[in-house]
Image: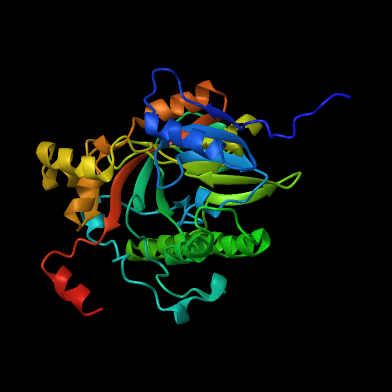
């Protein structure tokens, strides 16, 4: 009588990066650690892979078990692209007209239903790598595809990168306080809360785009791209696909963010199962925030970081955040896009060039007084 092993074969790990692309060993180690979790099937690392809190960022992870920690706290975080029509785009003038996106909207002013009834922080951008950017279309690689999206070289767009703010954090905390890094005890309940946070994030991006468009004297328009890169979904066969810093790449158009001083890339994703049906979500950090702050202060002045190498302006009243988010803290976006293309995961459609990037309001002497009144 033959004997059959009852052990589950180990999960596989694939990192879609060329040998010359720099991926931290700590990020690869985190992929291996995730692969060792019960029920894991496959971990796909994107070329922007870097270490995160408890799980790698820039990864798509499939499993027969649902792990909320692999999605993280900013459920529903994503990037949306909105057309915007302005007569003239003078960065200096437009930067001064951006609204204060740290001040929430009055929930009573929102005409549609607010997911989960979460009324806090509506219309705000948050911190970290979140931003709202006025950009112009640069190089068009695929004119026919760009035309289908209504875009051509020189057109203006608003790019909004933000998530579910405190809602996603609350959902993860409710899980971890009871179960730590373990599986979801009630996957259906977690997914219902998760889906509400994803809808909230999308609504929040639309609200911010409308706020900025109106402040700049333009009519708000619906997004032509809006893809979430922190999420979980159920695939055929009851497999859970966790994405943390990875955007859906199965036939979707995705804006892959560069840095505040480099282009971003709009791509057509066509990633298959080995890549977790996913593509990268950005350039990916190459320095921790502490390292970027330390090195940046030795290398740059605040004024240098507020005017980027491409001539754009950065609106940011938080000096520490300016250093943490300096372009030098990130990998080369061209390398990330090159790897996605080389592995057949995506095709570039066009680039966008920053004109004004908003991080947090720069209110000058009024900042402290205004914050104190809230």
Left or right of residue 79, residue 189 in this image: right
Residue 244 at x, y percent in the picture: 49, 45
Left or right of residue 54, residue 112 in this image: right
Along the line of sight, the residue nearer the viewer: 212 or 56: 56
Seen at 42% across and 66% down, the residue is 166
Residue 368 at x, y percent in the picture: 15, 71
Image quadrant holding the N terminus, namely top right
Image quadrant holding the C terminus, namely bottom left
Seen at 23% across and 44% down, the residue is 290
Residue 63, relative to residue 25: is it above or below? below
In this view, which residue lies farthest toward the front? Answer: 1
- State which quadrant residue 96 falls in: bottom left
- State which quadrant residue 241 falls in: top right
Residue 308, relative to residue 192: is it above or below? above
Residue 324 at x, y percent in the picture: 24, 46
Along the line of sight, the residue nearer the viewer: 251 or 324: 324
Left or right of residue 364, residue 135 in this image: right
Is any part of residue 4 visible from this angle? Answer: yes
Along the line of sight, the residue nearer the viewer: 295 or 51: 51
- State which quadrant residue 215 falls in: bottom left
Is any part of residue 145 visible from this angle? Answer: no
In this view, which residue lies farthest toward the top? Answer: 19
Colouring scheme applied when the structure was drawn: rainbow
Residue 57 at x, y percent in the picture: 44, 41
Residue 339, relative to residue 218: is it above or below? above
Residue 203, relative to residue 42: is it above or below? below
In this view, which residue lies farthest toward the right? Answer: 1
Q: How many tags in the picture?
A: 0
């Amino acid at each position: 009588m033959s004997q059959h092993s009852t052990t589950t074969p180990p999960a596989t790990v694939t990192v879609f990066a060329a040998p010359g692309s720099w991926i931290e060993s700590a990020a690869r180690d985190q992929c291996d650690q995730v692969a060792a979790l019960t029920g894991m099937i496959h971990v796909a690392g994107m070329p922007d892979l870097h270490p995160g809190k408890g799980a790698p960022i820039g990864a798509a992870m499939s499993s027969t078990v649902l792990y909320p920690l692999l999605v993280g706290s900013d459920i529903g975080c994503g990037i949306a692209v909105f057309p915007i029509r302005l007569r003239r785009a003078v960065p200096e003038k437009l930067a001064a007209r951006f609204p204060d996106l740290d001040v929430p909207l009055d929930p009573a002013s929102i005409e549609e239903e607010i997911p989960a009834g979460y009324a806090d922080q509506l219309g705000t951008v948050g911190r970290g790598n979140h931003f709202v950017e006025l950009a112009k279309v640069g190089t068009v690689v695929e004119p026919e595809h760009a035309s289908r999206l209504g875009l051509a070289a020189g057109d203006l767009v608003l790019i909004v990168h933000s998530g579910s703010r405190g809602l996603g954090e609350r959902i993860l905390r409710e899980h971890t306080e009871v179960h730590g890094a373990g599986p979801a005890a009630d996957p259906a309940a977690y997914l219902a809360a998760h889906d509400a946070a994803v809808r909230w994030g999308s609504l929040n991006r639309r609200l911010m785009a409308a706020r900025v468009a109106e402040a700049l004297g333009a009519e708000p328009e619906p997004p032509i791209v809006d893809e979430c890169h922190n999420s979980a979904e159920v695939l055929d066969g009851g497999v859970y696909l966790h994405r943390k810093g990875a955007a859906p790449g199965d036939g979707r158009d995705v804006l892959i963010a560069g840095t505040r001083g480099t282009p971003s890339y709009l791509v057509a994703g066509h990633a298959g199962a080995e890549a977790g049906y996913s593509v990268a979500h950005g350039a990916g950090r190459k320095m921790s925030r502490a390292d970027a702050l330390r090195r940046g202060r030795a290398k740059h002045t605040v004024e240098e970081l507020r005017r980027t190498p491409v001539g754009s302006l950065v609106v940011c009243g938080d000096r520490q955040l300016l250093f943490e988010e300096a372009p030098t803290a990130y990998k080369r976006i061209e390398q990330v896009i090159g790897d996605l293309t080389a592995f057949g995961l995506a095709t570039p459609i066009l680039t966008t060039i920053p004109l004004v990037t908003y991080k947090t309001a720069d209110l000058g002497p009024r900042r402290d007084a205004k914050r104190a009144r809230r």
